[in-house]
Image (cartoon, rainbow, N blue to C red):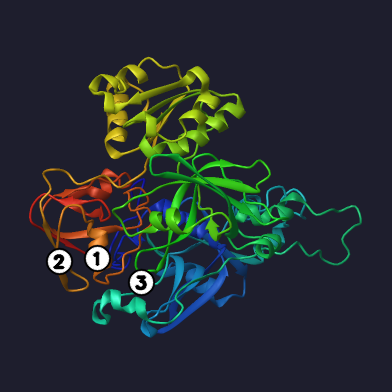
Amino acid sequence: MNDTSYPVTDRSRVRLFGGRGSNDRQAIHEIIDAALYGVVSYQIDDQPFATPTMVWRHGDYVYWHGSAGSRMLKHVSQGVNVCVNFTLLDGYVLSRLASAHTLNYRSVMVFGRPEAVAEPAARREQLEYFLTRYFPGRWDEVKQPTEAELHSIIMVRMRIDEGSAKRRSGPPAEGLAIFGGEALYSQQCWAGEIPLATVALPGRPAKRLHESVTTPDYVTGFAQRAGYRTPAEVNVHDGRYPVIVSETERVGRDIKRFRLAIGEGLALPVIPAGSHVRIGTVLDDRTREARQYTVVEVATDGSWCDIAVLREEVGRGGSRYLHDEVEVGSALEIEVPENEFPLDPATRHAILIAGGIGVTPIVAMARALQRAGTSFEVHYSARDMAGAAFVNTLHEICGDALHLYDTAAGEGARMRLPELLAGRDAGTHSYTCGPAALIDAVVDAASAVGFPAACVHHELFKAPPPLSSDKPVTVSFARSGRELRVEPGTSILDAALSIGIPVPHSCKRGECGLCATKVLGGTKVSYRDRFLTDAQRSDDALACVCVCWAESETLVVDL
């Protein structure tokens, strides 16, 4: 067993495509901890059994206990082979194909041989650990177990010898090759997801509580601590917020700002600097697709937020829809995903670096740092600064801390990144958003001058462009039995989707890892993602198909 993953044999090897499975220890532990109970599977005299029971994890061991009369506990404590399953259901997935309905889920199977926890002191220790972990402070309030009570139970622990995690998320995987790919979208039938969430209801007191006993924090705060939702959250919203466009403004060449106002009496959730909102758009083929845009500013009372959208002539039409068809008074719907580009709370001074439309999160960060009283500086590079977005806004926020670089003026007008990053005090962090070339240059310069790698933060606004050396690649999709010649400029992900091969994906920039796929053959992979570790890339094991390429003519992937 190493620090990052459990050993793999045939019983724990994950065979799902698209990086949907993992033997990673942290991923496995997170699902076990969120599940709170597991299903213990075992066999007695050729008869299989599966018993749901409360299970908790402590390090690389899982524990469960129960009555001394339990047949299951008596049997498994003898050291037989056991599999424990944990499953979290996240939603129903309804497809336009009758055969493709499914569930979104996260699940874990772990394997081992349980052993009895025999010593009463060890049993007591684990009961305290369980209560303290899930209900901090409760152990000191409850009646402590007597020696007789500890002897009246059976407790077992099982070292996780092997384990695997699997997940399925996102919309229906439609467009199977036999159904003609794009033709399926003409089916007049609703398709999508029905999200499911566990709701923690308010604590319901037992009979005859003493009048002095109030509801403790470990009860009122349980939903937040366990990652569950409260009834109030369910009643107010389900993660989607209806908004009305209350203002629009052209803030730069081909860049438009939209103010999205929520209805009276409601409020948007907290949207920290660096966040996106996911907004519904309509593509050129009149199908709907959500796109993510950075939040530039948020009202302090949560009544509105601003986004900025660059109009892109080359693409599927989402940005053109927002520019050409959305106007003041238009009703839209947004979601607020988890912030993937947050400010580090340890930042004592921030170097904010923006390139082109990548200025949008930098504006939000500068505003947040100003309000927090944290020192910062902004370095903003654009081609033809006269048409750049938010220059006046940044002048108002930053004053003399704003530095502009008009790359149209030639090489001499570019940032001197090594000089900018060298010799900085401890606690200085850099935050970069822009094209891949800028991010790579910042990372390289930071490494060259000894700027701590842990203090270098970045977000890629677009997928990295193809290299001039890229050549067409013939991609074999082994699982689907298809083959396609893919030209530079079209991602392997988009090529797969275009012929109806389902691939989980989100960012399309090589940052989220959802499209990570096993490479089965071909040539050495040019990765270009910012997600996979060196271990995951070893021997071309995984590649993010939204950005990767092959260094010669063929590639075989597990799709």
Q: Secondary structure at mark 3?
A: loop
| Label 1 close to label 2 by CB (< 8 Å) | yes
Q: Earlier in the sequence, mark 3 or mark 1?
A: 3
Front-lying residue, 500 or 143: 500
- Label disc, if present, on residue 529 of the rendered structure: none
Residue 366: horizontal and vertical position, in percent? 52, 30
Residue type at the position of mark 1: Ala
* Marks 1/2: CA–CA distance: 8 Å
Query: Crowding near pointer 2: few (<14 within 10 Å), some, many (20+)?
Result: some
Q: Earlier in the sequence, mark 1 or mark 2?
A: 2
Q: Which residue corresponds to the image point at 89% horizontal and 64% vertical from the top-left?
A: 208
In the shown orientation, is residue 490 left or right of residue 427?
Answer: left
Residue 472: horizontal and vertical position, in percent? 11, 55
In the shown orientation, is residue 475 left or right of residue 124?
Answer: left
Front-lying residue, 84 or 373: 373
- Label disc, if present, on residue 484 of the rendered structure: 2
Where is mark 1, residue-wise? Answer: 496
* Image vertical order of residue 88 relative to residue 394, above or below: below
Where is mark 3, residue-wise? Answer: 173
Residue type at the position of mark 3: Ala
* Marks 3/1: CA–CA distance: 12 Å
Residue type at the position of mark 2: Leu
